[in-house]
Image (tube, rainbow, N blue to C red):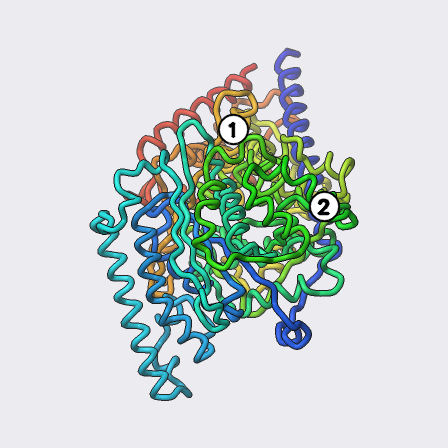
Amino acid sequence: MATPLRVGLRSTGLTWLLAFLCESWLTLTWVLVLNLNWSPVIFKTYPDRLLQGVHELPSVDMFVTTADPVLEPPIILVNTVLSLLAVDYPAQKLACYVSDDGCSPLTYYSLVEASKFAQLWVPFCRKYDIQVRAPFRYLSNDPIITFSDRTKGFQHEWKRMKDEYEQLCHKIEVAVQKSVPPRDFADFSNVDRNNHPTVIKVMWENKEGLPDGLPHLVYIYREKRHNHPNHYKAGAMNVLTRVSGLMTNAPYMLNVDCDMFVNNPKAVLHAMCMFLDSKSESKIAFAQFPQEFYDGLKDDPYGNQMVVALQHLGRGAAGIQGPMYTGTGCFHRRKIIYGLSVDDLGSTNANLAEDICSKFGNSKELIKSVADALKGKTRPPNSLQSCIEAAYQVSGCGYENGTSWGTKMGWLYGSATEDVQIGLLIHKRGWRSCYCTPDPPAFLGCAPSGGPATMTQQKRWATGLLEILFSRGCPIFTSLFAKLQWRQSLVYLLILSSGLHPVFELCYVFLPAYCIIVDSHFLPKVQEPALCVPIALFLTNNINTLHEYLRAGLSVRAWWNNQRMTRVSTMTARLFGFFSVMLKIFGLSETVFEVTPKDQPSDSGGGDDHDAGSFTFSESPIFVSGTTILLVHLTTLVVSLLKLQYPPAHDERGSGLGEAFCSSWLVLCFWPFFKGLFRKGKHGIPKATIYKSATLAFLFLFWCRRTAMG
């Protein structure tokens, strides 16, 4: 008669141990969040005052990266480039470089046509002080509103711009449908996108150096070979850095993703307010602008707009050593990307030049430009075409062999989130960063609008963050042996450790189901006063987060969608990210950089379609875990309601209201999966996924029953 009791006590002890470990992890996370929010800072910039106090503005090189003409349609890239070319800044001080890792003739053709349209669009924007300089956004406005308080001359030019832009869109659409490059694009004929030489095209050059002209525009697709790793976006950014160093060598560099257009024409001036302050030269390494999105779905059904999370992360870190680099919408000092640390500021120019040759490769022209950049000198050549030969050399896939590119300077390799990695290295060298939040927002991008796209993005983030956490660049070690501040290391630890959340949440997700099936418990019973503790924690956390969303101007539904999607993405995409990193650590496979699909801009404004916020699925195995969790908890709720548990062996055993509430809460969180069980098409879960999930759910429930039977 003692055996069932021993089994029951052992089962209860195991559940309590797992609950304790999970709560310990969540407590650590809470401490890290408290550190982040302890001393928030908001920067205010005044571009008009800057223009009064600065005699000559510095040059800025602008980088745009794209990798796939299907997942990232050319019209999106075109609008981003046009908005960059039209910013309020002297044109002779700007140069735009586009990296096409997709080696696509469609992308090149679109940029050729866009450069022609830019000769009309840029003067129009400057003449009439247009605020939104991405044509797809501005020209889609209601003409009645646009024409208010405007002259007939403006109305005539506006209609002309709209006609010209529609022709541009039509040309690109026809080229996409034909998928055949024009005859004069010989460089793209019979090209394998993963095995091809470098192509660099100067698409437009401001030869006269006119301040109201069109900035330089350069197109690059770098060399790729099967036996050389291309290092994805990080590799592309390093090529852009080297090529721009030869051609224009601006002391500041802006990088944006292909979908992130300039929403505030004074964005560059706002960044210069941060850099040109008298005290910033020895402190500020980069100015990060927040990621904000246009035409986001109402109430953020996929939880990927991250309004509140980015506010906390940016403002909180700004009060310590500065925000992280998020990979887009960021201005960098070139010399810091070249590896300059705070300690090097006191070094002589000779000492700096002596260390160059062994780090930057064997291009004499590049070494000279790097030396100029480190000395604060900018001597661009008389013609961009004169640098083409050297630019081809530094774009070769073998140029980085034996150099420090990707390891100690430039964008670092080894992680799918190269942005966080290079930001950590910069902070490690003692530099600070700043969080610039002008009104209106400087840049706007497009958030993933479907389940598969959202999961792809979340999986890549989780994979990259864990790769950094398990590397030698772990922030705990860098705070001990480098110049990373202790509190800043905790901020990085908070972000990097988010990739470990699936392990602990997975335990917590299955604990209620296990307890209901075996008729055990890990929460206090209703009659026990200790039940007040988890209830108070639950209510306090949710009321606090709800208040934050309401204060940010968001709705209650947006709050719930973000709470729900946090659980869903953790148990699906981030879980797969964790597994992929574990396989990499054990040498079983390598992680792969996955491009997030971008939606083409439309004139509809987004969010009006009834099915726009409905969760979408695909054949991806990412959705198996979420469907399994739903099926498990649906079954356990039925078991609990019908009292089908294995008979209890002791009076103190038995699941309670707490476990049933947890299961019900998880079913609510995975409600889109529940609806997906009965829908078809992209809004329905594929049958193969349901069968796999049902098998896994049955195996878990069978194991629980065997455990209950001793």
Q: Where is residue 31 in the image (x, y as percent from the top left)?
A: 73, 44
Name the residue type under label 2.
Ser
Q: Nearer the viewer, mark 2 or mark 1?
A: 2
Q: Quadrant of the N terminus?
A: top right
Q: Is residue 177 visible?
A: yes
Q: Nearer the viewer, residue 591 or 630?
A: 591
Q: Nearer the viewer, residue 451 or 678?
A: 451
- At x 44%, y 45%, the residue is 389
Q: How crowded is mark 2: few (under 14 residues within 10 Å), some or many (20 or more)?
A: many
Q: Position of residue 531 (x, y in %)?
A: 69, 41
Local SS, label 2: loop
Local SS, label 1: helix
Q: Position of residue 640 (x, y in %)?
A: 50, 33
- At x 61%, y 56%, the residue is 251
Q: Can residue 675 be seen in this view?
A: no
Q: How crowded is mark 1: few (under 14 residues within 10 Å), some or many (20 or more)?
A: some
Q: Which mark is residue 659?
A: none
Q: Nearer the viewer, residue 672 or 473?
A: 473
- Quarter assignment of residue 154: bottom left
User: From what the image shows, is residue 159 above or below residue 383?
Assistant: below
- Tell me if 42 is positioned left or right of 264 in this view: right
Q: Distance between the residues labelled 2 and 1?
A: 36 Å
User: From what the image shows, is residue 361 above or below residue 158?
Assistant: above
- Quarter assignment of residue 276: bottom right
Q: Which of 207 and 601 is in front in this view?
A: 207
- At x 30%, y 54%, the residue is 109
Q: Which mark is residue 341?
A: 2
Name the residue type under label 1.
Phe
* Precedes in sequence: disc 2 or disc 1: 2
Circle 1 is placed at which residue position?
Answer: 579
- Tell me if 539 is positioned left or right of 709 in this view: right
- Tell me if 546 is positioned left or right of 106 in this view: right
